[in-house]
Image: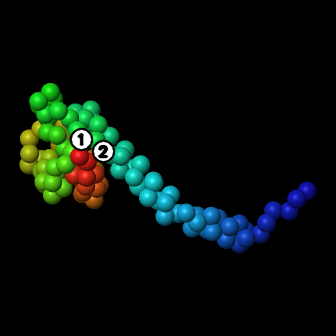
């Protein structure tokens, strides 16, 4: 029967594995999380916020100023801007998440 390696050795190997390439992995994970948050908006505002305002009657989010998007999302979240569903959606995110989502849509073209 094979003897398992000592626990400190396992911890060191796990740490080394997590540190090698962890920057890329963390960035990929953050990117996936952000795209997941933004995907919530796709049903109404189109993929990557590229809806046709003429077709949907909803705001095209892609390329809007980040500060403007944050202001609007915050107004929805605080109930200061009337809406049918945006108030409930915005309440599901923290201010930091709303800021990240705004940055994502502002970066789209």
Q: Nearer the viewer, mark 1 or mark 2?
A: 1
The local crowd at label 2, few if under 14, some if 14 to 19, many if 20 or more residues have their Cα within 10 Å, is many
The image position of residue 69, as x and y in percent, is: 16, 51
Q: Nearer the viewer, residue 5 or 50?
A: 50
Figure coloring: rainbow
Rendered position, 9 above or below 75: below
Q: Residue at x 61, y 68 (%)?
A: 15
| Front-lying residue, 43 or 90 | 43
**Could you tell me which secondary element the residue under label 2 belongs to?**
helix
Q: Is residue 19 left or right of residue 10?
A: left
List the residue tagged with mark 1. 49
Is the N terminus in the top left, top right, bottom left or bottom right quadrant? Answer: bottom right
- Residue 49 in picture, x, y percent from top left: 24, 41
Can I make out residue 46 in this image? yes
Whether 106 is drawn above or below 21: the answer is above
Res. 78 in view: no
For marks 1 and 2, the one nearer the N-term is 2
Please tell me the numbered disc located at residue 38. Answer: 2
Q: Residue at x 81, y 62 (%)?
A: 4
C-alpha separation, residue under disc 1 versus residue under disc 2: 8 Å
Q: Is residue 70 left or right of residue 8?
A: left
Provide the secondary structure element on which disc 1 rests: helix
Q: Nearer the viewer, residue 77 or 66?
A: 66
Residue 11's image quarter?
Answer: bottom right
Asked if the residues shown at circle 1 and circle 2 are in contact, with their CB atoms under 8 angstroms apart, the answer is yes
Q: Where residue 38 sits in the image (x, y, percent)?
A: 30, 44
């Amino acid at each position: 029967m094979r003897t398992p390696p000592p626990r400190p050795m396992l911890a060191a190997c796990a740490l080394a594995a997590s540190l090698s390439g962890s920057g890329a992995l963390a960035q990929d994970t953050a990117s996936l999380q952000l795209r997941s948050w933004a995907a919530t908006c796709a049903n109404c505002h189109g993929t990557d916020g590229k809806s046709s305002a003429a077709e949907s009657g909803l705001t095209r989010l892609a390329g809007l100023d980040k500060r403007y998007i944050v202001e609007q999302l915050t107004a929805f979240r605080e109930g200061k801007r009337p809406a049918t569903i945006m108030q409930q959606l915005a309440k599901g995110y923290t201010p930091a998440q709303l800021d990240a989502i705004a940055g994502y849509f502002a970066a789209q073209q």
